[in-house]
Image (cartoon, rainbow, N blue to C red):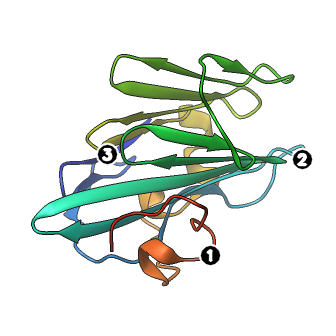
């Protein structure tokens, strides 16, 4: 199953429902509702529109790993800027970059996310996990407030105000 956020506001859920996301709050794109076998992931997104240009960032947590993605394909893993690809983790998860796209593969939960230079996000999960996912992708929308400067996404690099 896949879920996507494209352009400034176009959003499509795992069930292919489409809607327009116009607010600038921090959203839970997808998360494990209940950790299975100790495996847990969460992806949050925030966006900001200035002068008709939308910038988007994401924060992904997977067990003890935190990945932040910012406009311009800037990435941080556990607060360390990523300068070379691929990044391979002990459990087999990895991050790689091909052209203007970054691919994040979470091995233990079989989740793949792509993030491109335009801020488009595609999330792919096995069909067997769809019922265990909460957040916008699962039509269980959660707005956590705080906008682009929330503490969860806040590091040394910010989305434009």
Q: Give coordinates of residue 5: x percent, y percent.
A: 30, 49
Please name whichever residue, 127 or 124, is drawn nearer the observer in this view of the structure.
124
Q: CA distance from mark 1 to mark 2?
A: 25 Å
Q: Secondary structure at mark 1?
A: loop
What secondary structure is found at the residue carrying circle 2? loop
Q: Residue at x 46, y 28 (%)?
A: 102
Structural distance between the alpha carbons of marks 1 and 3? 20 Å
21 lies left or right of 45: left
Question: How many other residues sit within 10 Å of disc 2, few (<14), some (14-19) or many (≥20)?
Answer: few
- How crowded pointer 3 is (Cα within 10 Å; few <14, some 14-19, many 20+) is rated as many
Circle nearer the N terminus (3, 2): 2
The earlier-in-sequence mark between 1 and 3 is 3
Q: Circle 2 is placed at which residue position?
A: 38
**Drawn side of residue 116 relative to residue 37, left or right:** left
In the image, which disc is placed on residue 119?
3
SS assignment at label 3: loop
**Image-quadrant location for residue 34:** bottom right
Task: Name the mark nearer the viewer: 1 or 2.
Answer: 1
Residue 146, relative to residue 127: is it above or below? below
- Please state which of residues 72 and 14 is positioned toward the viewer in this rendering: 72
Residue 29 visible here: yes
Residue 93 shown left or right of residue 116 in the figure: right
In the image, what residue occupies the spot 77% across and 30% down? Answer: 108
Residue 112 point in image, percent of width and height: 54, 30
Residue under circle 1?
151
Q: Quadrant of the C terminus?
A: bottom left
Residue at the extreme bottom:
145
The picture places residue 119, in percent across and down from the top left corner, at 31, 45
> What residue is shown at x 55% (from left), y 40% (from top)?
75
> What residue is rendered at 89% in x and 47% in y?
38
CA gap, disc 3 to disc 2?
Answer: 30 Å
Q: Nearer the viewer, mark 3 or mark 2?
A: 3
């Amino acid at each position: 199953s896949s879920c996507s956020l494209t352009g400034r506001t176009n959003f499509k859920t795992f069930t292919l429902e489409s809607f327009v996301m116009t607010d600038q709050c921090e959203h839970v794109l997808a998360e494990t509702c209940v950790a299975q076998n100790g495996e847990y992931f969460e992806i949050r997104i925030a966006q900001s529109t200035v002068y008709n240009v939308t910038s988007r960032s994401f924060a992904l947590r997977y067990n003890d790993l935190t990945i932040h993605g910012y406009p311009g394909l800037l990435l941080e893993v556990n607060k360390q800027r990523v300068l070379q690809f691929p990044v391979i983790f002990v459990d087999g998860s990895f991050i790689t970059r091909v052209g203007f796209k970054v691919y994040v593969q979470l091995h233990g939960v079989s989740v793949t996310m792509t993030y491109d230079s335009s801020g488009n996000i595609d999330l792919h999960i096995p069909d067997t996990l769809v019922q265990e996912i909460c957040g916008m992708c699962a039509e269980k929308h959660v707005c956590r407030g705080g906008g682009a400067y929330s503490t969860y996404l806040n590091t040394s690099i910010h989305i434009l105000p």
